Amino acid sequence: MQSLKTTKQFSYTYKKGMRTQGAFFAIYSLPLEGLPPFFGRPQTSLLGLSVSKKVGKAVQRNLLKRRVRSIFTNARLEKKQVVVFVAKTGIASLSYLELKQQILACLKRKSPNKPALRRA
């Protein structure tokens, strides 16, 4: 899974993507088909992380980013897509398993624009 790099990529995903909310985060997703040229030609899904200082100190933010990257890397996304994960205040109190359960439950919700997880 590759990462989003530019502000332009994040902004486009926020505007055009489908938003799904959890208690401590929001996930914006967008299929890879029909992306503008500034995304390049990604071969795998793209993941962007937005974790503000409201979440905690740098150590907590970095731990959260490592956990979220791990969850999305191991998740079996049905289609290649652009995903932006936005953390909210209070998410640092969740354990890894709680965070994983909430993210996977959020990804499984049916939406017309967003593909679900592939069953293993």
Image (cartoon, rainbow, N blue to C red):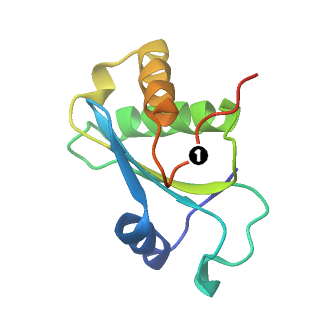
Which quadrant holds residue 36? bottom right
Q: Residues within 10 Å of mark 1 (few under 14, many from 20)?
A: some
Spot occupied by residue 101 in the image (x, y as percentages of width and height): 47, 18
Q: Quadrant of the C terminus?
A: top right
Name the residue beneath numbered marker 1: 115
Q: Between 19 and 2, which is closer to the camera in this rendering?
A: 19
* Residue drawn at (46%, 30%) of the image: 103
Spot occupied by residue 67 in the image (x, y as percentages of width and height): 53, 30
Left or right relative to 15: residue 112: right
Above or below, 34 relative to 81: below
Spot occupied by residue 48 in the image (x, y as percentages of width and height): 50, 56
Above or below, 6 relative to 29: below
Amino acid bearing label 1 = Pro
Q: Between 52 and 34, which is closer to the camera in this rendering?
A: 34
Above or below, 112 relative to 119: below
* Residue drawn at (69%, 31%) of the image: 74
Residue furthest to the front in view is 112
Spot occupied by residue 83 in the image (x, y as percentages of width and height): 52, 53
Above or below, 39 relative to 76: below
* Residue drawn at (29%, 38%) of the image: 57
* Residue drawn at (21%, 36%) of the image: 89
